[in-house]
Amino acid sequence: MNRYADVLLPLAFKQTLTYALPPALQGRVRVGSRVLVQLGPRKYYSAIVCRLHDVPPPPEVRVKDVSGLVDEESLLLPGQLRLWEWMAQYYMCASGEVMKAALPSGLKLESEMRLLRGQPPQDDAALTPREEAVLAALSEDEARSVADVQGRVGGGSVLPVVRRLVEAGLATVEERVVRQYRPRTVTHVRLAAPFRSEAALNALFPALHRAPKQETLLLRYLEMSHAAAAFALDHDGLLEEVPKADLLYGAEGGEAAFAALRKRGVLETYPFETERIKQATAQPRELEHPLTDEQERALREIDEVFATKDCCLLHGVTSSGKTEVYTQLIRREIEERGRQALYLLPEIALTTQIMQRLGRVFGGQMGVYHSKFPDAERVELWRRQLTERAFPLVLGVRSALFLPFRKLGLIIVDEEHETSYKQADPAPRYNARDTALVLARLTGAKVLLGTATPALETYRNARQGKYGLVEMFRRFGDRRLPEIVVENVKELRRKKLMPTPFAPRLLREMRDALVHREQVILFQNRRGYAPVLECRDCGWTPHCTRCDVPLTFHRKQNKLVCHYCGNLYDVPFACPQCGCTELRDLGYGTEKVEAAVRAAFPEARIGRLDLDTTRSRSSYDAIIGDFARGATDILIGTQMVTKGLDFERVRVVGILCADQLLNQPDFRAHERAFQLMAQVAGRAGRRGRRGLVVLQTRQPELPVVGQVVRNDYAALYRTQLAEREVFGFPPFVRLIGISLKHRDEHVCAAAAESFAALLRPHFRPDDLLGPDRPSVGRVQLQYIRRLLLKVRPALPVQGVRRTLQAAGAALQAVPAYKRVTLTFDVDPL
DNA sequence: AGCACGCCGACT
DNA sequence: GTCGGCGTGCTC
């Protein structure tokens, strides 16, 4: 019998901690169980058991007992911990950090300190005013949280005062594990125990003769609960659950009759746990469109690929009907092979459309896992996936990878090129697309990556035969791809032909579209009103005091906003440098574009889609819904408008400033610009006249602009690949980003220098870039330095990781650099 | 990540 | 002299 359990805590610890199993728990605890453990003098956490053993820890550690078992059944299915381990190892983070990301917060319990009043103070007790105040804020019977007491007292931290009061016995603390998740309950009705037999009821009915309402109600209950059948088998466990609301539904005077029956002791109520999971109601299957020849072919080819390979890329132009192919694959996985499917989609609010589409086909077989859903729903889905009733299909964002799957057979990664598959902060900085491949290997599932604009890495893997490659070139219903015209903004401005953010051609087309009751999408990759305010006289511009960035002017709020830390500032009345009261707004954000559209087309109905207008899920749905219904004519937005939305009536798409995309200081800038522009162009001309895209840029001569115009992914792939090979970037090397942060710029810079010095002996000089001051050199009062490590394919990645970790330890051993935060970002985007 | 412990400046 | 600030180290 195992006496010790190594557990994982949801903290950034490097290793697991060992707790002793009290005899009562031995044999009941399994790997994957959730246990309650005490950490430090009083805190409690729920931890996950990841090893059971009999090896006593070294004598210097005082091993604590496991305090209790949180759930009787394991929360994890066998194998899930292996994915966690892989992630921690590959992405260079603590397993506890993976645990934190993996579990919905309702499954992570943590104790909270609560304060109560202790013995009454002696008359001669000399209390400071502050102690008096804190004591007055405590109650004798209601335990209050520290935050509550802090709020009542105000001022500095109450903790030291509390400590003194506790030592004097005037206050007591208790630790309470807060149960964050409460299952939703509904009041149900059942027969009280003495009446759970036919004989008892037969004896009862004569007494009800003078109370017809009660009699009716009781009969109704018996019918709803299928009592006759249960009694015939003499098994009251077979009684159907009857919700009180259903029993009383439409029954006039039912409440009174019910109260009377309860008073007689015939019926009783009890809380019944129900699910809150929103699932598409099981509807009669929508007959899917019969597949086109091309879709049929794609399906066959995918089958052939899966016979020999575990991963296949489905590269299909926008509107080629990839979703129909996915649907068929999922259906067969579920129905023919009896296995589960996971449909991953990027972390953008657009789930609704796909949800509805798949919901119409799979109805009650589909569960949805989304970060914007209430946590309780995620907890329920998790629990359900552990059971026999697990949904065969889960639609979810990247964290859905962590859900338990009993028999996963297929993972679809839709829009695989999307950067939101990569978690940026905090650790684990994992890419869900790549992790999906590992999960598939661990579970024996297949992976289908789908997109119109593959990530270069993915396409290369496919071309080299590591993945299968299936392509679809034809748009649904043979619609033509939109015509793309390039407008040279530099020229137009020089000739003074462009006083608005719109080229004359774009204005004409917009007007034409409005006349024909067609719709327009305008893409401007910047939110706010103006990205920069500038003093007319001296050129001063307001900057964030915590970050090294100019502030964006938001006109509606009349505030300056830092887009890095979110801090708000008042708009200065005058320039602090020269006192000039005229601040000009330079450049365009979506808000200013909206104003310009209003000025040009006062009659048009306009929607705006950006971070500022979509703070809540419902507002996003509302804006999209209005546009989809045709209640708005023009939709202005940031990246959000490019994300695979299907609108039927859009004829004109304007890309207002491609240069912002093209001039990013990033080796992926052109790849991204292509993806974004191809995606947004794909929104045009789904029905009716051929769509038109007006692409405004100052650099029409760039090859990538031509590639967008011709929708020539192959050319983009060739040119970019050649460039990456010359300069040594992915997919020819793997990257590990290293960043150092500190409040003091000199310390930060010096630490980065010495870290680089520690690494240099291990790598070729060209393979370690930096340290550099990033374009935004300070965020949230922390100065930043970055290094970029190129890992050549020949190098053992494991050794590189060890080198990095050793160098990190060496750096932090220097007293001055102890407080430098060092983070690794494996495969950064 | 908390949270206790310990060192040092502001104020009674 | 004490209060309360914050930097440092540990948690089985």
Image: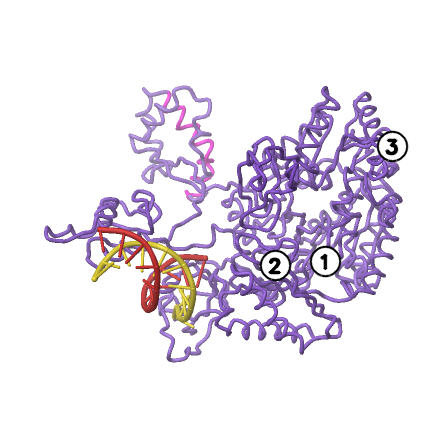
Chain colours: A purple, B red, C yellow
Q: Is disc 1 placed on a helix, strand or loop?
A: strand
Q: Chain of mark 3?
A: A
Whichever of labels 1 and 3 marks the residue nearer the N terminus, that label is 1
Numbered range of the magenta stretch: A213-236
Q: Chain of mark 2?
A: A
Q: Secondary structure at mark 2?
A: loop
**Alpha-carbon distance for marks 1 and 2?**
23 Å
Residue indicated by mark 2: A429
For the residue pair A231 and A258, the one nearer the viewer reads as A258
Q: Nearer the viewer, residue A154 or A12?
A: A154
Which of the numbered marks, if any, corresponds to residue A446? Answer: 1
**Residue type of the residue flagged with mark 3:** Arg
Q: Amino acid at mark 2?
A: Arg
Camera-near label (1 vs 2) is 2
Locate the N terminus of chain A and report the quarter of the image it occupies.
bottom left
Disc 1 from disc 3: Cα separation:
37 Å
Q: Are marks 1 and 3 in contact (CB under 8 Å)?
A: no
A131 lies left or right of A471: left
Q: Are marks 1 and 2 in contact (CB under 8 Å)?
A: no
Marks 1 and 2, the one that precedes in the sequence:
2
- In the image, residue A257 lies at what x, y percent? 35, 24
Residue assigned mark 3: A690
Within 10 Å of disc 3 (Cα), the crowding (few <14, some 14-19, many 20+) is some
Question: Could you tell me which chain the residue with mark 1 belongs to?
Answer: A
CB under 8 Å between discs 3 and 2: no
User: Which circle's residue, 3 or 2, is located before the other in the chain?
Assistant: 2
Q: Which mark is residue A815?
A: none
Mark 3 secondary-structure assignment: loop
